């Protein structure tokens, strides 16, 4: 299987699925995060629901990223189509995206764990999710929550900017350079035109 992946110029079906699931989850997190933090206080019920969904998607993003990293470490991706600075920039950008999709949910989880409100997390309204150890017992939970909130938000904005650059680079490869970079991450079509 590994030899097949080395010889293939496309990413595996698992890598493609994980890429797009993580992308969808990340876009959903940004959207829900933006909406919930800009709601008025007279919509507390909706705000609470959106926070729970945001936390559910955050944990899902964390777990999907861990699976993707394990997959990446045990399966050889196709070789890069470019060399030099483009290959190096791609390597750095992908590495940063992996790190950020781990750090952002962890910062959010830590923030919720340190919150003076002590609101439990119930994933998708079904699965109770624990707080991180030590943080619920902090003496100055409000200050810790504020620092973690700023960290979570700053990392999210940085990741969103990097994701936009990532997408722009993929479109540049497809439309300007006319290479197969983007098509390697698109699921193959079935049928006579494949």
Image (cartoon, grey):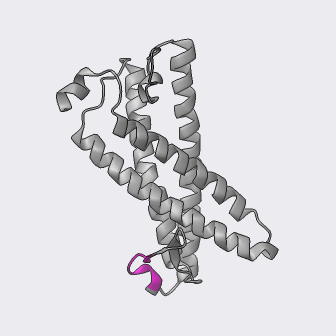
Which image quarter: residue 191? top left
Residue 37 seen in the figure: yes
* Magenta residue check for 154: no
Q: Residue at x 43, y 26 (%)?
A: 188
Query: Which residue is situated farthest in the front direction here?
Result: 191
Q: Residue at x 55, y 68 (%)?
A: 147
Query: Residue 166: image x %, image y %?
Result: 52, 33
Query: Residue 53: image x %, image y %?
Result: 59, 65
Horizontal relation, residue 72 to residue 175: left or right: left
Tell me the magenta residue range.
128-136
Which image quarter: residue 4? top left
Q: Residue at x 78, y 73 (%)?
A: 43
Q: Residue at x 35, y 53 (%)?
A: 66
Disc tally is 0
Query: Depth check: 176 or 49 in front?
Result: 49
Query: Depth check: 34 or 161 in front?
Result: 34
* Magenta residue check for 130: yes
């Amino acid at each position: 299987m590994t030899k097949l992946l080395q010889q293939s110029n496309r990413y595996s079906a698992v890598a493609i699925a994980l890429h797009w699931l993580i992308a969808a989850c990340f876009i959903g997190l940004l959207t829900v995060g933006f909406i919930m933090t800009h709601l008025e206080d007279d919509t507390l019920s909706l705000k609470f629901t959106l926070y729970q969904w945001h936390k559910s998607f955050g944990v899902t993003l964390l777990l999907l990223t861990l699976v993707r990293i394990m997959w990446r470490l045990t399966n050889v991706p196709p070789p890069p189509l470019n060399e030099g600075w483009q290959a190096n920039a791609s390597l750095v950008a992908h590495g940063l995206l992996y790190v950020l999709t781990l750090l952002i949910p962890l910062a959010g989880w830590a923030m919720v764990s340190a919150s003076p409100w002590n609101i439990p997390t119930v994933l998708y309204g079904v699965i109770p999710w624990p707080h991180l150890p030590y943080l619920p017992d902090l003496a100055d939970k409000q200050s810790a929550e504020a620092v973690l909130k700023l960290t979570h938000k700053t990392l999210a904005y940085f990741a969103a900017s990097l994701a936009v650059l990532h997408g722009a680079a993929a479109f540049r490869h497809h439309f300007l350079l006319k290479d197969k970079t983007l098509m390697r991450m698109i699921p193959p079509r079935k049928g006579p035109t494949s």
